[in-house]
């Protein structure tokens, strides 16, 4: 993964979060309220935004810390799994999606730990 790819992924992930948030507020609100999952959908959008910012930070810092590519992968996969499973849970009310969410959370935590580790291990001369 290179800097350009990371930054493109971050911008697309951010744009998608805005679209999903707006879509939920307008077209999906009735469905989400009926399913009792408006808060769940909002949590998914919020975490997608948090990790869009993290991915942007990784992209910006990538030239100085090229090993951050692994953190980017964990942020992308974690967001897809964490937020994606919450979106599916919110829209389908199929509760098994809730069992998938922790795997995404674990990937997000791993991304943050990789981020910290790469910066900690970087030699400063």
Image (cartoon, rainbow, N blue to C red):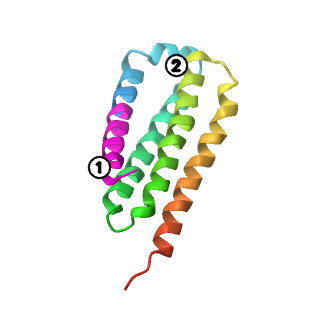
Residue at the spot 40% in from the left edge and 50% down from the top edge: 1
Q: Which residues are magenta?
A: 1-17
Q: Which residue is mark 2?
A: 32
Residue at the spot 56% in from the left edge and 61% down from the top edge: 113
Q: Where does the image place residue 105, in percent across and percent down from the top left?
A: 60, 45
Q: Secondary structure at mark 2?
A: helix
Front position among marks 2 and 1: 1
The answer to which of 14 and 58 lies nearer the viewer is 58
Magenta segment: does it hold 12? Answer: yes
The answer to which of 93 and 75 lies nearer the viewer is 75
Q: How far is mark 2 from mark 1, CA to CA? A: 36 Å
Asked if residue 25 lies left or right of residue 32, the reply is left
Residue at the spot 29% in from the left edge and 49% down from the top edge: 4
Could you tell me which quadrant the C terminus lies in?
bottom left
Question: Image quarter for residue 82?
Answer: top right
Q: Which residue is mark 1?
A: 4
Q: Residue 26: give its label.
A: none
Q: Tag 2: Cα neighbours inside 10 Å, few (<14), some, or many (≥20)?
A: many
Q: Tag 1: Cα neighbours inside 10 Å, few (<14), some, or many (≥20)?
A: few
Question: Image quarter for residue 102?
Answer: top right
Q: Secondary structure at mark 1?
A: helix
Magenta segment: does it hold 92? Answer: no
Name which of mark 2 and mark 1 comes first in the sequence.
1
Residue at the spot 45% in from the left edge and 75% down from the top edge: 122
Question: Image quarter for residue 40?
Answer: top right
């Amino acid at each position: 993964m290179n800097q350009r790819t990371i930054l493109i992924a971050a911008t697309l992930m951010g744009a998608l979060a805005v679209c999903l948030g707006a879509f939920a507020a307008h077209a999906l609100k009735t469905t989400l309220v009926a399913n009792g999952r408006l808060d769940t959908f909002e949590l998914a959008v919020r975490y997608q935004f948090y990790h869009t910012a993290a991915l942007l930070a990784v992209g910006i810092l990538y030239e100085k810390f090229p090993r951050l590519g692994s953190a980017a992968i964990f942020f992308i996969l974690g967001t897809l799994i964490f937020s994606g499973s919450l979106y599916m849970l919110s829209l389908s009310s199929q509760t098994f999606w809730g069992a998938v969410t922790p795997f995404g959370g674990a990937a997000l935590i791993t991304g943050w730990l990789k981020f910290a580790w790469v910066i900690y291990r970087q030699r400063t001369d």
